[in-house]
Amino acid sequence: MFGPAKLWSFFANVNWSFSFMKALILVDIQNDFLPGGALPVPNGEAVIPVANNLQAVFPLVVATQDWHPADHGSFAGNHPGKKVFDQIELNGLPQTLWPKHCVQNTRGAEIAAALKQDRIARIFSKGTDKGIDSYSGLFDNGHRKSTGLGEWLGAQGVIEVFVCGLATDYCVKFTALDAAQMGFKTRFIEDASRGVNLRPDDVANAIAQMKRSGVKVAQSAELLVSK
Ligand SMILES: [Zn+2]
């Protein structure tokens, strides 16, 4: 018989995390990408209050964290004769050289203190291999290794992700592109993100590229009212 006891045991064994169909991915909201940091994104601090408000309307929130060893290949200082923003080839991949940033266990690598963190279920680190950079929070730049984020979200029953943070034209863009490629319905939250704009059109081009890849653009206001 399928009586109350059986029914209870059925419900007790349901993985209720499957109700987490939407996830917010907060990309690299770390001290070094904020004013006063090693690689500040212009007006990067503006994403924090927006990201704090958004967290309340998502059942699942995760964050990514750029987390480099001091000898990381993306740092200009590790390439004698090269300077910041030079383009090189690193193990067969094009690489922009950056100032030393987000070195593991330093203050610059810490998630910004002003960002609410009590609802962040997990933080996924990236860029830990000195031989390859990782703009995306899901894979390194050569798609050689996964960070585990995409697989973990899938295991939670997530089908739709909302990506925001720093910086629009690098880590946010590549996180959104990889999420879409993995099959997640993906939205980029424009006003909860800021870009570097090394070239003046970089942010506009990043948004256009995301759109071409099936990523929809959202503003925080529409998400906050659709609760
Ligand atoms: Zn980095």
Image (cartoon, grey):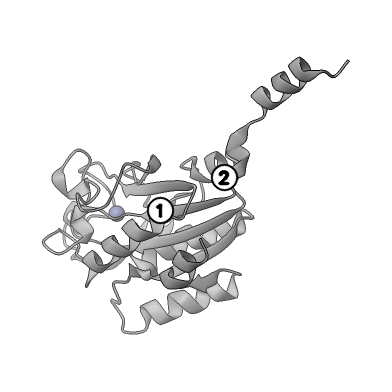
Question: Which of the two discs, 1 and 2, labels the residue nearer the N terminus?
Answer: 2
Mark seen at residue 56? 1
Callout 1: few (<14), some (14-19), or many (20+) C-alpha neighbours within 10 Å? few
Of residue 218 and residue 179, the one placed in the foreground of this image is 218
Task: Determine whether the residue tagged by mark 2 lies in a helix, strand or loop.
Answer: loop
**Residue at horizontal 52%, vertical 65%?**
226
- Residue 100, percent across and down? 18, 54
In the image, farthest residue toward the left: 36
Compared to 169, does 145 lie above or below?
above
Mark seen at residue 166? none
Of residue 225 and residue 216, the one placed in the foreground of this image is 225
Of discs 1 and 2, which sits in the foreground? Answer: 1
Task: Determine whether the residue tagged by mark 1 lies in a helix, strand or loop.
Answer: loop
- Residue 85 visible in the picture: no
- The Cα atoms of the two marked residues, 1 and 2, are separated by 14 Å
The number of numbered badges drawn on the structure is 2
Q: From the viewer's perspective, is 11 left or right of 110?
A: right
- Residue 161 visible in the picture: yes
Compared to 3, does 105 lie above or below?
below
